């Protein structure tokens, strides 16, 4: 058994959950580095003697993963392999009293807005002047740019406002500084993230200012792609579509979680929209930017969802033919409005409905991909994996969307650079191509 470290402290930051957490970990690591701390991200040798776990508390599976990770490092602490374990992020924000009681061997728990306090415990100073300074953990050619924190939406199923607080936009000038610094480091693709991109600017500019932000970001030299994640359908600023259509740097891509299409379910979900309005919005998107790729996510098995309501959802998916789609089984979240409803759709029915939606989407994706055969696309090459170079078109986001595979035994393309690729064959979720 190892006793307390005598070597210089090394802080291992472990990130769980979504891209917003990735961003927060990068900010934390940037602050630690500025205080001359030795810091690593998810160190493969696991030899950091101080561990900071940035947790997710969004849905059941994510919470379980976070708790298992905490228990894993607490066990390492008890074995003397690590000296200190700190927990931060959404799970800690939401369940701190319960966690302190159930897993007391964690040295301290911190919430989502406790960065200065966490840094103090790690013997680092919080430096206000470090606008845009981060230790990026993504590949060297793309990075997330978080443009706002928190959410003002009242969605019945979602606990994010409980964990992240009210919507707070980051001023455009700060985001331009941050994006410029990223571009100087070689970042070519910016992925704009927030709990709700649609709301951006309302709090500080008294208007929806996403289009204004995009017009400033496209001026940054070195940035070639700007991608939009997590828009909200109600109040979507349609001037964004004009920027998307007219600015080559803004990818013809939008991630907009729509969740359902049935009016009764949408009303219970408190989404502020309807079947008719949703259909109309998608039509506006496709009329304004005809080759836009739309990614959405759906919740099935919401309390009270009938067979007929689910069939309406399936029919709509079949008619709409989304380029990208993910489906999730509803899970009860404490302290949300929907938690007061009876979770009356059996788990096996929820999973069956997820499978039905994803099988339908798989067929749609296959058909859409077949149409790409023979076409040429500008692709960003993300990595080499085995015998393939793997890249993406502007219609695909990292980790969640289609990939373009290039045979590395026959062709060479440079990782982190753009290449022109002709598509030669396609499956449901992969395209195969050759450099032009």
Image (tube, rainbow, N blue to C red):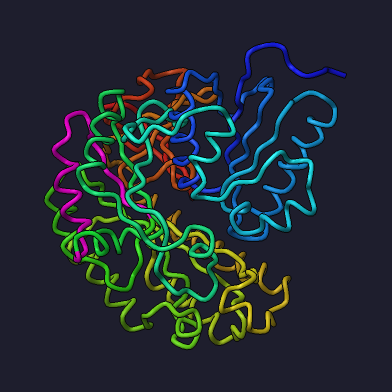
**Of the pair 32 and 159, the residue shown nearer to us:** 32
**Of the pair 11 and 114, the residue shown nearer to us:** 114
Residue 391: where, in percent of width, then height? 39, 33
Residue 159: where, in percent of width, then height? 55, 66
Q: At 37% from the left edge and 45% from the top edge, which residue is drawn?
A: 396
Quadrant of the rendering where the N terminus is positioned: top right
Q: Is residue 399 left or right of residue 92?
A: left
Quarter occupied by residue 11: top right
Q: Looking at the image, can residue 289 be seen? A: no
* Number of numbered callouts drawn: 0
Q: Is residue 157 above or below residue 211?
A: below
Going by the picture, which residue comes out furthest to the top? 7
Q: Is residue 247 left or right of residue 272?
A: left
Residue extent of the magenta highlight = 206-229
Q: At 48% from the left edge and 40% from the top edge, which residue is drawn?
A: 116
Residue 45: where, in percent of width, then height? 68, 20
**Of the pair 128 and 72, the residue shown nearer to us:** 128
């Amino acid at each position: 058994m190892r006793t307390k470290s005598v070597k210089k402290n090394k802080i291992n930051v472990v990130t769980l959950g979504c891209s917003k957490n990735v961003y927060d970990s990068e900010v934390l690591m940037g602050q630690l580095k500025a205080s001359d701390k030795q810091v690593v991200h998810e160190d493969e040798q696991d030899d950091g003697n101080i561990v900071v776990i940035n947790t997710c508390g969004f849905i059941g599976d994510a919470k379980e993963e976070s708790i298992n990770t905490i228990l894993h490092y607490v066990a390492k602490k008890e074995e003397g392999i690590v000296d200190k374990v700190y927990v931060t992020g959404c799970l800690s924000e939401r369940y701190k009293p319960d966690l302190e009681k159930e897993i007391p061997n964690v040295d301290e728990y911190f919430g989502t807005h406790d960065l200065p306090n966490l840094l103090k415990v790690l013997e680092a100073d919080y430096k206000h002047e470090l606008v845009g300074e981060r230790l990026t953990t993504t590949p060297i050619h793309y990075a997330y740019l978080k443009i706002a924190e928190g959410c003002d939406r009242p969605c019945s199923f979602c606990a994010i406002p409980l964990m992240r607080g009210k919507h707070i936009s980051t001023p455009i000038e700060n985001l331009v500084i941050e994006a410029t610094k990223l571009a100087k480091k070689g970042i070519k693709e910016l992925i704009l993230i927030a709990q709700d991109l649609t709301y951006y600017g309302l709090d500080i500019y008294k208007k929806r200012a996403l289009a204004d932000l995009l017009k400033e970001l496209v001026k940054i030299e070195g940035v070639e792609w700007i991608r939009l994640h997590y828009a909200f359908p109600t109040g979507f600023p349609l001037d964004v579509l004009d920027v998307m259509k007219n600015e080559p740097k803004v990818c013809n891509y939008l991630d907009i979680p729509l969740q359902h299409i049935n009016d009764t379910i949408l009303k219970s979900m408190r989404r502020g929209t309807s079947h008719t309005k949703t259909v109309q919005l998608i039509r506006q998107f496709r009329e304004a930017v005809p080759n836009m790729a739309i990614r959405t996510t759906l919740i099935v098995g919401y309390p009270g969802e009938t067979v007929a309501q689910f069939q309406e959802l399936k029919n709509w998916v079949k008619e709409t033919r989304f380029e990208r789609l993910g489906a999730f089984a509803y899970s009860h979240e404490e302290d949300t409005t929907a938690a007061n409803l009876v979770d009356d759709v059996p788990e096996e029915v929820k999973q069956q409905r997820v499978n039905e939606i994803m099988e339908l989407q798989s067929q749609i994706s296959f058909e859409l991909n077949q149409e790409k055969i023979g076409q040429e696309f500008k692709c960003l090459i993300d990595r080499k994996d085995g015998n393939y170079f793997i890249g993406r078109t502007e219609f695909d986001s990292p980790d969640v969307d289609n990939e373009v595979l290039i045979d590395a035994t026959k062709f060479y393309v440079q990782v982190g650079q753009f290449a022109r690729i002709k598509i030669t064959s396609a499956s449901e979720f992969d395209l195969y191509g050759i450099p032009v």
